[in-house]
Image: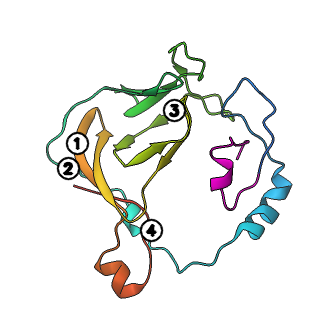
Amino acid sequence: MASDSPEVGPLLKRSNNVYNPTGDDISGAMVDVTHLKSIAEASAISYNKVNLTGNAFNPVAPAGGNPATTLQIFFSFLNQVKWTFDAASGAYLRFQDKADGTGNLFSAADRLDEKQLAFNNVIVLFAKHSVLNSQRTLIDIDLLYTSGKAFLFWNGQVYPIKWTTANGNYEKSTGRLRPIRFIK
């Protein structure tokens, strides 16, 4: 993590702090890569193997799509994101604010190659959550063993779907966990 707040810090049971050399960049953080292996080994937790097949992407679009070339998420005046569908690339381009309260959105770029972040699909899910600070920038989202509604934005269309992390017959019969799954 790149620092914490008094509200969040005590909730982080296993974490490592990394250095943020650019105080004006809320997502800027650095860690010496030579330390990553030792951090990972020190943080390793032994779990049963996780079944990741639920994350396989179905190349066939679900039924019931509607046109959706722009998606804007306004969670608070310090937390705004916009996605715009680019038909030429078939991807949603990401824009975000700088958490400065102006509401101005800027192209979100990959720091390694400076290309704008672009994704073939975007999923927005609705979940029970608690706001942890007055600026509404720290959120605790309850995704454990539950489910809810979601929207899949794909190829300029939006589809109503559902998400789940609830244990089902598979988990009960195998003892193996699956991560969040998206279903029609």
Mark closer to the chain start, 4 or 3: 4
Q: Which residue is mark 2?
A: 62
User: Which residue is drawn at the image coordinates 44% and 80% (left, top)?
Assistant: 176
Mark 1 surroundings: few (<14), some (14-19) or many (≥20) residues within 10 A? many
Contact between labelled residues 1 and 4, with CB atoms less than 8 Å apart: no
Inspect the image, locate mark 4, and give the three-letter code of the amino acid beneath it: Leu
Mark closer to the chain start, 2 or 1: 2
- Span of residues in magenta: 1-16
Q: Main secondary structure of the magenta part?
A: loop
User: Which residue is drawn at the image coordinates 68% and 33% (left, top)?
Assistant: 111
Contact between labelled residues 1 and 2, with CB atoms less than 8 Å apart: yes
| 4 vs 3, front mark | 3
Q: Which residue is mark 3?
A: 136
Contact between labelled residues 3 and 4, with CB atoms less than 8 Å apart: no
User: Which residue is drawn at the image coordinates 72% and 42% (left, top)?
Assistant: 2
Residue 104 position, x and y percent, is: 52, 14
Q: Which residue is mark 4?
A: 52
Could you tell me how far apart the alpha carbons at marks 1 and 3 are, in whole angstroms? Answer: 28 Å
Could you tell me how far apart the alpha carbons at marks 2 and 1 are, in whole angstroms? Answer: 7 Å
Residue 29 position, x and y percent, is: 74, 39
| 1 vs 3, front mark | 3
Mark closer to the chain start, 2 or 4: 4
